[in-house]
């Protein structure tokens, strides 16, 4: 299916239906727009042209990544989108010309904004003031972040979020 067909199909479908449709798969990312991309990591973990497009299909990998990245500065958020299962492989990072030589995980996907935005949900991440300025999340708060991810980003929770905005 091409991008235009996907856009038309999603536009004519309630978001909650897309999130309930087994023909789609959920992809997740954690980001903090208040933290600029570390330019020193270009060529190692990303390229400037694909910054902000990295997603995973693993909620467990998302929780781990979030625990590593959430501290330091408030403003973190989760971006969630749905992609047709039949289209998923074309977005795998290991097949992407700019990403395939980088340090990537097998569950990484590069989703362009024009595709992610079709079904995107944005969910604010948890934050504690004592995390500000810290390099690492205290071990005592790992559970809090993991529970938040499981509770707020489960398939059922995402459908409820869609229904609230429809």
Image (cartoon, rainbow, N blue to C red):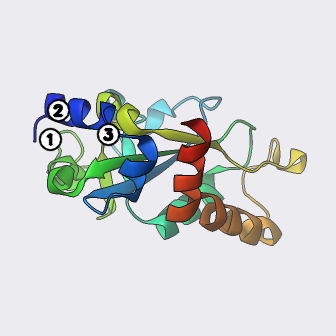
Q: Secondary structure at mark 3?
A: loop
* C-alpha distance separating marks 1 and 3: 12 Å
Which x, y percent locates residue 15?
43, 42
Q: CA distance from mark 2 to mark 1?
A: 19 Å
**Which label was assigned to residue 43?**
3
Give yes or no for contact between labels 1 and 3 (Cβ–Cβ under 8 Å). Answer: no
Residue occupying image coordinates x 21% and y 57%:
85
Q: Which residue is mark 1?
A: 97
Disc 1 is placed on an element classified as loop
Q: Residue at x 46, y 30 (%)?
A: 39
Which callout, 2 or 1, points to the residue nearer the camera? 2
Q: Is residue 154 above or below residue 132?
A: below
Query: Is any atom of residue 11 visible in this view?
Result: yes
Using the rendered view, name the quadrant where residue 145 is placed: bottom right
* Percent coordinates x, y for residue 124 in the rendering: 67, 42
Which circle marks residue 3 in the picture? 2
Q: Nearer the viewer, residue 143 or 21?
A: 21
Q: Is residue 104 visible?
A: no
Q: Earlier in the sequence, mark 1 or mark 3?
A: 3
């Amino acid at each position: 299916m091409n991008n235009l067909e996907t856009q038309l199909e999603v536009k004519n479908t309630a978001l909650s239906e897309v999130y309930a449709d087994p023909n789609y798969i959920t992809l997740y990312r954690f980001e903090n727009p208040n933290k600029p991309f570390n330019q020193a990591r270009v060529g190692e973990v990303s390229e400037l042209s694909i910054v902000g497009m990295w997603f995973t299909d693993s909620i467990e990998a998302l929780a781990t990544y979030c625990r590593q990245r959430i501290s330091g500065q408030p403003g973190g958020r989760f971006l969630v989108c749905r992609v047709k299962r039949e289209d998923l492989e074309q977005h795998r990072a290991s097949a992407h010309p700019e990403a395939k030589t980088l340090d990537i995980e097998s569950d990484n996907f590069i989703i362009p904004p024009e595709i992610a935005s079709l079904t995107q949900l944005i969910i604010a991440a948890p934050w504690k003031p004592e995390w500000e300025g810290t390099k690492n999340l205290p071990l005592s708060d790992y559970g809090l972040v993991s529970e938040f991810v499981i509770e707020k980003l489960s398939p059922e929770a995402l459908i409820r979020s869609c229904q609230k905005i429809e």
